[in-house]
Image (cartoon, rainbow, N blue to C red):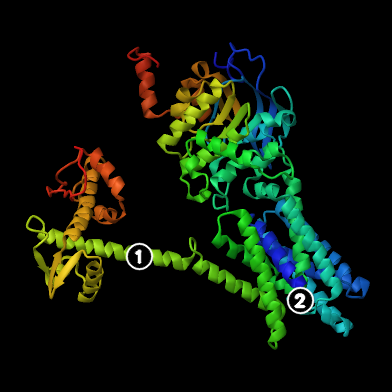
């Protein structure tokens, strides 16, 4: 379990750089390309020694990367196609070799096809030691060269001008990626290693805007998902370890996409809902005010039917918004008669003021025709802040009427230095 | 007359210790030539504009000088020596779009990156680095944006962050790639102010500039480029209609044609 946890954490850490540098596809290709290397190493050595297989995987992975570069550089094939081609060809070759091995040596092969989907639950002592060593090496390198890797990922050419050997750093970071992929093959397997790499990092990105925190969070999520996956597959019957780990960290990703405070979907939906409600409330205040303005806004009442007519709302939605206004003390209702309270009058006047000042701004400063400005003002009246409005008021010279000759209200408490 | 000023310097200027010298520079991307046979000497303590049409090789010239792009032939020197000798004297402001602004980092972080060169390998930014970075942000008037993630900044603010980062490099020569593109009027003014301050401090700025209208107003030296060097020299003698025409392929606008007509009739004076 320790091995799996470390692997998960390290994958998360390197995964951060992988997604920030847009190398996710490359990581996937490397993993798939490793398969024939593993098979060939097995055929050569005749035994499932972890070190030999690891070296085989490494060699094949690097060959794959070279092929990608070669294809892109010497033909009209673009990088994403090249990666797809290399991935498929190498993986296909690997499957052919795997099948051949399964046919010839019946006893030994069972270890090998675990490379497809991982076998974390049965990692042996020696495997864990290798994982420990390599994971520590990778983590230490990231810690040591943190600012160099950050610079490389954010603004490579700027770093070059400063004199950092960006080419070598790039090779180094990619080498770390290869190491993590090849070592991670044992836990989650060829097919899913890219998920172990990317999912924790993507989840972590949702929660923070700082690279350092993102890396730490990705390590926690990656390690945690691994631990839970191993535990789950050990406790429950028939649960393969690798896919379980990936499912758990994917669940974490979905949770992050939905629930993260600033960037999550749910938060966004909630904020939209609140905004929509505020807009409806302000519109209703405005409607009432417009029906009674000029007379006695604080004491005149308006009927439900009249209110419905002005915006074509259903009775139900009218009542709903009305009760929100009532709760805020802005409106009084008696049966079907609606009346603004003094605070309600002020609130309504502020919205109307925003609408009419904005219309005046559009017609005077941007010289729009006065029958073009109503729709824009309908939207802007909810978006303008009070401070901004005061600036517009001053800019226009504290005007009294809007483009349609209607009075621009000035609620008490609004200071006019004019 | 026009053939004399065809290549290289305005004949009257003798540049003693050029801050940048380029010789026989040819750069190609694959088989496509971008810069061809460029010979250039640029004087120190000026605000120098590089102008030319799209694809003229302006950015490429900058990048070659900075060693980011390898030339096919030729060489360039800064302060009389190869690039590696005086790296700490050079500041760079790349194009804003060269970077992914969604990267998880703050404005202060980006400016601190400008100090990585002087920090050296393996060192971490210390408190005094952060303070210096903050003061560079303040010089561009955006210190209150220090802890904002960079995608939450406007275009003009992002440009100022890049400039603050270059300031942190404490250079003698600044190379800027289109610093005035896509910024609001306030930022444009602030950037211009910064350039003038740099010149007053004895520094040199070489900027790829996209707007012909403001060349004479903002800069005192100009390089006209269209794969070949058309002309280089002080704005007053080199930034002429003829040179501009030869750089841009002879498409004067109706307005400047009218101006030419009026000039030749003696009805207006050249400003």
Q: Which residue in the structure is indicated by mark 1?
A: A274
Q: Residue at x 51, y 33 (%)?
A: B139
Q: Quadrant of residue A49?
A: bottom right
Quarter holding the C terminus of chain B?
Answer: top left
In the visual, does A106 lie left or right of B59? right
| Label 1 residue SS | helix
Residue occupying image coordinates x 93% and y 72%: A45
In this picture, residue A134 sits left or right of residue A80 = right
Res B61 → quadrant = top right
Q: What element does badge 2 sit on?
A: helix
Q: Position of residue A350 (x, y in %)?
A: 22, 53
The answer to whether residue A226 is seen in the rendering is: yes
Residue furthest to the right in view is A45
Q: Please tell me whether residue A196 is drawn above or below residue A20 in the rendered image.
A: below
- Pointers 1 and 2 within a single chain: yes
Q: CA distance from mark 1 to mark 2?
A: 47 Å
| Residue drawn at point x = 68 percent, y = 60 percent | A13
Percent from the top left, x then y, of residue B246?
Answer: 52, 25
Instruction: Please name the residue that numbered disc 2 is placed on.
Output: A120
For residue A385, side relative to residue B196 (left or right): left
Residue A112 is situated, as x and y percent measured from the top left of the image, at 82, 77
Residue B57 shows up from this direction: no
The image shows residue B255, relative to residue A2, as above or below, that is: above
């Amino acid at each position: 379990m320790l091995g799996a946890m470390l692997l998960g954490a390290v994958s998360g850490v390197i995964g951060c750089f992988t997604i920030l540098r847009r190398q996710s596809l490359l990581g996937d290709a490397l993993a798939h390309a490793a398969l024939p290397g593993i098979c060939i190493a097995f055929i050569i050595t005749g035994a499932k020694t972890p070190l030999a297989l690891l070296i085989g995987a490494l060699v094949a992975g690097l060959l794959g990367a070279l092929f990608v570069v070669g294809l892109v550089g010497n033909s009209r094939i673009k990088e994403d196609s090249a990666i797809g081609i290399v991935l498929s060809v190498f993986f296909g070759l690997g499957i052919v070799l795997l099948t051949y091995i399964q046919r010839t040596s019946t006893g030994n092969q069972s270890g090998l096809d675990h490379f497809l989907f991982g076998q974390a639950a049965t990692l042996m002592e020696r495997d864990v030691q290798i994982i420990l060593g390599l994971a520590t090496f990778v983590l230490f390198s990231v810690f040591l060269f943190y600012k160099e890797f950050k610079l490389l990922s954010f603004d490579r050419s700027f770093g070059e001008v400063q004199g950092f050997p960006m080419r070598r750093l790039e090779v180094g970071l990619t080498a770390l990626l290869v190491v993590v992929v090849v070592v991670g093959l044992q836990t989650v397997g060829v097919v899913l290693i890219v998920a172990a790499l990317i999912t924790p990092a993507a989840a972590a990105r949702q929660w923070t805007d700082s690279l350092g925190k993102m890396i730490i969070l990705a390590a926690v999520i990656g390690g945690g998902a691994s631990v839970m996956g191993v535990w789950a597959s050990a406790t429950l019957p028939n649960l393969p370890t690798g896919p379980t780990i990936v499912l758990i960290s994917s669940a974490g990703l979905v949770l992050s996409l939905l629930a993260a405070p600033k960037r999550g979907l749910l938060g966004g939906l909630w904020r939209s809902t609140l905004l929509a409600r505020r807009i409806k409330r302000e519109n209703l205040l405005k409607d009432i005010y417009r029906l009674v303005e000029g007379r006695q806004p604080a004491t005149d009442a308006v009927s439900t039917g009249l209110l419905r007519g002005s915006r074509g709302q259903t009775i139900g939605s009218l009542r709903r918004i009305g009760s929100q206004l009532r709760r805020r003390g802005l409106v009084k209702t008696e049966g079907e008669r609606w009346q603004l309270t003094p605070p309600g009058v002020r609130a309504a006047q502020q919205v109307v003021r925003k609408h009419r000042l904005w219309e005046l701004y559009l017609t005077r400063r941007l010289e729009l025709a006065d029958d073009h400005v109503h729709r824009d003002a309908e939207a802007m009246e909810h978006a303008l802040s009070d401070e901004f409005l005061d600036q517009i008021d001053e800019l226009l010279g504290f005007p009294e009427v809007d483009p349609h000759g209607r009075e621009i209200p000035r609620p008490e408490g609004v200071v006019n230095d004019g | 007359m026009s053939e004399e000023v065809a290549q290289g310097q305005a004949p009257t200027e003798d540049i003693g210790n050029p801050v940048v010298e380029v010789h026989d520079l040819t750069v190609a991307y694959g088989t496509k030539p971008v810069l061809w046979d460029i010979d250039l000497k640029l004087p120190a303590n000026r605000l120098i504009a590089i102008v030319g049409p799209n694809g003229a090789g302006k950015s490429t010239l900058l990048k070659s000088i900075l060693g980011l792009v390898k030339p096919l032939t030729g060489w360039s020197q800064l302060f009389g020596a190869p690039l590696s000798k005086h790296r700490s004297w050079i500041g760079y402001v790349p194009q804003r779009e060269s970077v992914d602004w969604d990267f998880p980092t703050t404005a202060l972080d980006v400016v601190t990156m400008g100090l990585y060169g002087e920090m050296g390998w393996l060192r971490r930014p210390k408190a005094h680095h952060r303070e210096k970075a903050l003061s560079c942000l303040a010089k561009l008037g955006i210190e209150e944006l220090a802890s904002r993630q960079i995608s939450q900044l406007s275009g003009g603010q992002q440009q100022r962050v890049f400039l603050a980062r270059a300031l942190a490099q404490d250079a003698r020569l600044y190379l800027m790639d289109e610093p005035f593109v896509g910024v609001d009027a306030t930022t444009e003014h602030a950037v211009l102010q910064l350039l003038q301050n740099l010149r007053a401090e004895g520094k040199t700025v070489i900027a790829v500039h996209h707007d012909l209208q403001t060349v004479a107003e903002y800069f005192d030296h100009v390089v006209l480029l269209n794969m070949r060097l058309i002309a280089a020299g002080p704005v007053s003698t080199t930034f002429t209609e003829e040179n501009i025409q030869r750089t841009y392929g002879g498409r004067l606008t109706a307005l400047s044609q009218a101006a030419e007509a009026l000039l030749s009739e003696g009805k207006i004076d050249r400003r």
